[in-house]
Image (cartoon, helix red, strand yellow):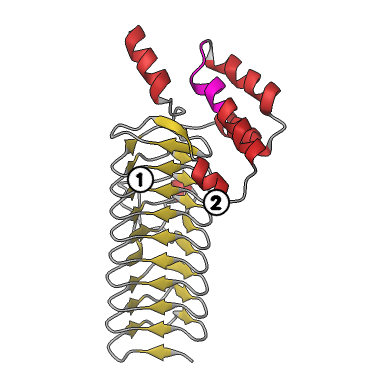
Amino acid sequence: MLAIDPTARVAAGAVIGADVSIGPYCVIGPNVTIGDSCQLIAHVHVTGHTMIGRGTTIYPFASLGTPPQSVHYRGEPTRLSVGARCQIRESVTISIGTAGGGAITTVGDDCFLMVGSHIGHDCRLGRSVIIANNTMLGGHCIVGDNVFLGGNCAVHQNVRVGEGAMVAGFSAFADDVIPFGFVLQPVARLAGINVVGMRRRGIGKDAIRAVQQAYTLLFEAEGEFAARVDEAETKFGSVPEVAGIIAFIREKSRRPIMLSKVRGRRDAEAE
């Protein structure tokens, strides 16, 4: 049953699904689609060409679909797509895309965006991403499935965070993070592998051991990095999780790959 509080404002043209609850003082724009069984608690603002997936809950003072914070935006009808069953907590902000960045910002299914987090224009979040309080993603970031970003992180634009990675709170970083990487530093460096997250996903011991060995070879061994990548692929590339890391490293990116604490310390000492 559709339930719209009399104080809410739903513009003509908005598409509202079945069994949706729109609470007090919500404002819904004319180009918005709200999927079935969504719940907008109160004081929620949804505008722009925005689609909210089925079963998503949005808490007070969240603002979704507003124009991107980009000097290059000229009012193009770009989009925001939020997946199914997401939890979007108080004061979250998510911008629509830009014409030069793919024209769409996407949040995958089953994501949990905590209080005050910000998703910049043209970002692409995978499934089951958790972003803790007050963390900020600059534009054009790509975040893989099952990533956890701790509170008060600052992620530079164009950064990629590979699937299954974990970033500790108060980390600021501008380098790409490999799949299953664990990041811990105020100026972030890789600190190892997110073993706990891999176990929770049911990844077997042999695969985890292979990822750990590949990590040591890639990020703690001596020699040219490209040669270490080739060697890791030869030794461990038959393991899907390692193959994913190798593919991530080799994929063209606008940001460098984040180094480990060990490697970074050695490089600093060498200088």
Residue lying at 29% horizontally and 73% vertically, measured from the top left: 60
In this image, 43 relative to 182: left or right? left
Residue lying at 34% horizontally and 33% vertically, measured from the top left: 188
User: In the structure shown, which secondary structural element does the residue marked by tag 1 occupy?
Assistant: loop
185 in relation to 227, above or below: below
On the image, the x and y values in percent for residue 106 come to 48, 57
Q: Nearer the viewer, mark 2 or mark 1?
A: 2
Residue lying at 70% horizontally and 22% vertically, measured from the top left: 234
On the image, the x and y values in percent for residue 81 come to 48, 63
Residue lying at 47% horizontally and 48% vertically, measured from the top left: 147
| Magenta region | 214-222
Query: Which residue is more in the foreground, 132 or 73?
Result: 132
Query: Which residue is more in the foreground, 234 or 22?
Result: 234
Query: Which picture quadrant has residue 243?
Result: top right
* Residue 220 on the magenta span: yes
Task: Name the mark on residue 200.
Answer: 2
Query: Which residue is under mark 1?
Result: 138
In this image, 71 relative to 200: left or right? left
Q: Amino acid at mark 2?
A: Arg
Extreme-front residue of the structure: 205
On the image, the x and y values in percent for residue 219 come to 49, 22
